[in-house]
Amino acid sequence: MSTSDQVSDAHSENVSTDTHPCARIPFPWPVGGRGEREPFVRKAIVRSAVGVGLAVAASAALLPSWSAGASQKNSVDDGTVDSFGRIAQTVLSERTAALVDDPRAAERIAGPKAGRNVRVSAGLTHSEDTAVTSLRARKKLLAKLGEAYSAARTEVSVDDTKVKDGRATVEVTETTTFTYKRVKGDEPSTTGFKARHELSFTASKGGKWELTGIRSTDNGLRAVNAPVAKPVASAGSTPSATRAATSWPARAVPKKQTTSGYDYAAMAAYAEKYWRNYNPSYRKFNADGGDCTNFISQALKAGGWKNETGPASDYRTWWYDPKAQSDSWVGANEWSWYALNSKRVTTLSNVYQLEVGDILQMDFDRDGSKDHSMITTYRSRMGVPYVTYHSTNTYRKSVASIVASYPDAVYYAYRT
């Protein structure tokens, strides 16, 4: 009996989400209902092997493409479901290959990440590259402990698929078997496990799907090929912004041109151009908790802020690409942590010290979590800053009117 037959079948789990306010990171995908099709239950198996007698990973490119249309937004055909499984197999097999004591294993096992109708997003590619690196380090640690694997085999079955409004949530079961390398001489032949994962796909233009997320739905000990994310500083150790006073008048703090050469006029010009008519080059997050921080990030980039890449969830990174973005790009708290940690901003002691290109954030309910982000695009000769922002789309609103409307809110002012 094979190892995969010895491990009991897994059951899928239901996952629910809540709507995040503007401050919070928008969920990368909503989990919806079943849509118009019945769950894919034939458990299509996708196999990949590492070592002698390798079975080459099947490519999603060989499968029929799916054309997104209004009548299909809540359903996909079986070919697309198969593609979902194959791209999952590619990602999970690359994790497996990283642990095999064969320098050619990864090259032999890996199928293409891009197919005719399904591909891995750029953001997830960043994350998986980091994951594979961590697994290679684990392989070295295992070698020091006298353990190695000479071959491996990964199978993926698609258990359930739910599609709603251009987003798909796919439940899969991974069955992986490792062959022990004879190091001490008394090792058993193999070790194996079953693991459940939830995959998230987003439909893009041209009828293509992108894998944007993959997470384990199991409890207990992690599988040997399950990566451990690089530790990220907890919220308790993140940089803390200083509260800004709202008293008028305030001592002026003239803005100095930074050595980094940021163009504050360009930041303001961008915000005032796109406050109402959104820039089509960027995704919108109005339906996912709010677009305010996404908007100020765009303006800051227009003024010279450069991407700082890394894991999306690490507040020490700040980036946007056509497929994904860092949490700090769209989350008010995460933006503050990043901006302070990177030294791209300093805090101001009073909201009336804001100059063009500076950022104002608010905590409406005084719970310690920032709820809204705005950029200063004009300052009067009398020293009153005016801010422009999304959610709700607003042009040159005076800070004085905001303070008058929200006298009990907590304010944070940042010099960029």
Image: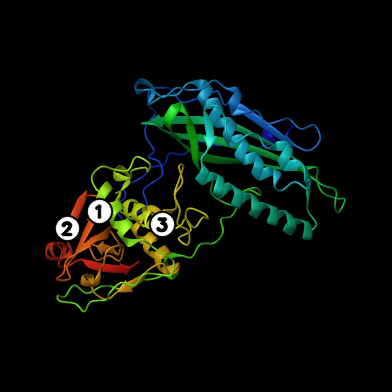
For residue 195, what is the image quadrant? top right
Three-letter amino acid code at the position of disc 2:
Lys
Decide which of tag 1 and tag 2 comes sooner along the chain.
Answer: 1
Note whether 287 is above or below 401 in the view shown: above
Taking the image as drawn, is residue 228 in sight?
yes
Decide which of tag 3 and tag 1 comes sooner along the chain.
Answer: 3
Three-letter amino acid code at the position of disc 1:
Tyr
Q: What x and y, as percent, mark residue 207?
A: 45, 26
Note whether 209 is above or below 129 in the view shown: above
Tell me, for residue 328, which label it has, or none: 3
> Which residue: 34% across, 23% down?
70
Which residue has dot 1 on it? 389
Q: What x and y, as percent, mark residue 399?
A: 18, 64
Instruction: Single out the residue that lies furthest toward the bottom.
Output: 251
> Which residue: 25% across, 42% down?
277
Cα distance, mark 2 to mark 3?
25 Å
Which residue has dot 2 on it? 397
Callout 1–callout 2 Cβ contact below 8 Å: yes
Cα distance, mark 3 to mark 1?
17 Å
Q: Quadrant of the N terminus?
A: top right
**Residue 385 located left or right of residue 182:** left
